Amino acid sequence: MIIYKRQVKVAFLLLLLSQTSLIAQFTYSGNINPSKMIRTSNQSEIKLPFRLATIKASYTMGSFDFLTNSAIEYRWDGEPTFDFREVYVAYFPDWGEVKLGKQIHAWGMVDGNNPTDNLNAYDYYFMFMPGADRKIGSNSASVNLIFGDYQFETVIIPGHTPNRLTFGEDDFPIKPPMDEPDSYVEIEDPMEIGFRLRGSFPAADVSLSYFKGHDRLFSLSGFTLVEGGMPNFNFGFRSTEVYGANLVTFLGDMTLRGEFGYFNSKGTIIKNDFNIFDNNAEYLQYVIQLEIPGPLDIALNAQYIGSRIIEVSELTLVTLTGMVLYHQDIDTFSPGMGTPFAMFAENGLSLSATGWLMDDRLELSANTFMNLDENGYMIGARVFYSPSESWGIEAQLSQFIGDEENSENPFTKLEDFSHIQIGLKYSF
């Protein structure tokens, strides 16, 4: 009798597992994309890493999804590196969604240049790629409550992740102002948290957000005096609060998007025997985007990107001989959070057009970004041809024009980075 009951239990478990496997689903997609970057000035190779392959996989079982987003990073004169960009589990109850693990979040409503999207750090090696492709995943938990036309999202990030900068890269023109510090001032409370409320109305979609975290770029925090010598500088990450607002509405056939971020940064609190800089600042970043449907299925897009420093704690550090070691004011302050493209221009204009031909097998696009305050702009063009469903050939031009009289102009520094990128793409 006991043996019979055990057999019944085993049979029931096998039946349950078989039913579960029937409703479970595994999917994957990805691409293999070898490419090369060649300078337009002298046809030399730009030896920077690129994503040779990417793959996204998900396993769905009932209300749960297990997702991974991975990439193989490679440079032609180096070794491949495997990176799990995202690994997380998602649960979808009737009232919303819950996610836990290494994630790339997407806040903001304009395309790409989002002042309010600060939950993830940026990878400067891929800064010119679109959207989430230039972000670094962070271990986090998010809960999104959905009630009617409204959503309320909470994101908790237990640890701080800085931007990945291009230290020691001769082929990358925008370099950090100094070598990588040996260490950073420890963040005593690395917990970061964000809230976002979204609402859908008949005339527009609106969202309000708040994020409290630490800068993604390091800054000078203080110094330690050394008897008879130069002081030792200490670097850290300012604590920053971001208040954001987003809007999407329609003007006839056109789509209008707007995004606004107010940043309040405070210097790192140092409890050791350091001289501390009052490294506080307030600044704004904002983007207005207009999408216009053109003839022959051409999509036109215009973006105005603006930033303004409101107030900065001014400081000048000099030696006994009068030599200036450090100076900070509104003109020299560098924001540690926000859209990276704000560093190219306080007021910039981006224009783009994309069209599809030959039953969408041929994609043609052109774009430009202009500094509205001083000389400097970028022009680009892209051709992508897909002879079959899985294969594609891509050629892309990026040309930067700066100001010969201003070597510190970001576009002047980028002139030598003007290049053609050619690649082959296989999708699966």
Image: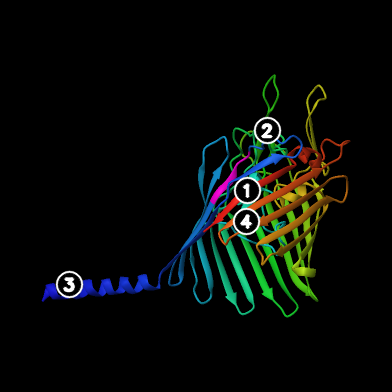
Q: Amino acid at mark 1?
A: Gly
Give the Cα separation between the discs numbered 3 and 2: 69 Å
3 or 2: mark nearer the eye: 2
Give the Cα separation between the discs numbered 4 and 3: 52 Å
Residue 228 visible in image: yes
Residue 346 percent coordinates (x, y)? 82, 50
3 or 1: mark nearer the eye: 1
Q: Is residue 312 magenta?
A: no
Residue 423's tag is: 1
At 62% across and 58% down in the image, what residue appears?
386
Residue at numbered disc 2: 170
Residue 274 percent coordinates (x, y)? 66, 34
Judging depth in this view, the residue of 326 and 337 nearest the camera is 337
At 37% across and 73% down in the image, what residue appears?
22
Q: Main secondary structure of the magenta part?
A: strand
**Disc count in the image?**
4
Instruction: Please say if 348 is above or below 293.
Output: above
4 or 3: mark nearer the eye: 4
Q: Are marks 3 and 1 in contact (CB under 8 Å)?
A: no
Q: Amino acid at mark 3?
A: Arg
Residue 382 percent coordinates (x, y)? 72, 53
Would residue 88 be found to the left or right of residue 363 on screen?
left
Earlier in the chain: of badge 4 and badge 1, it is 4
Q: Is residue 50 magenta?
A: yes
Q: Are marks 4 and 3 in contact (CB under 8 Å)?
A: no
4 or 1: mark nearer the eye: 1
Query: Which range of residues does the magenta coloring cover?
Result: 48-53
Residue at numbered disc 4: 132
Give the Cα separation between the discs numbered 3 and 1: 60 Å
Judging depth in this view, the residue of 36 and 203 nearest the camera is 36
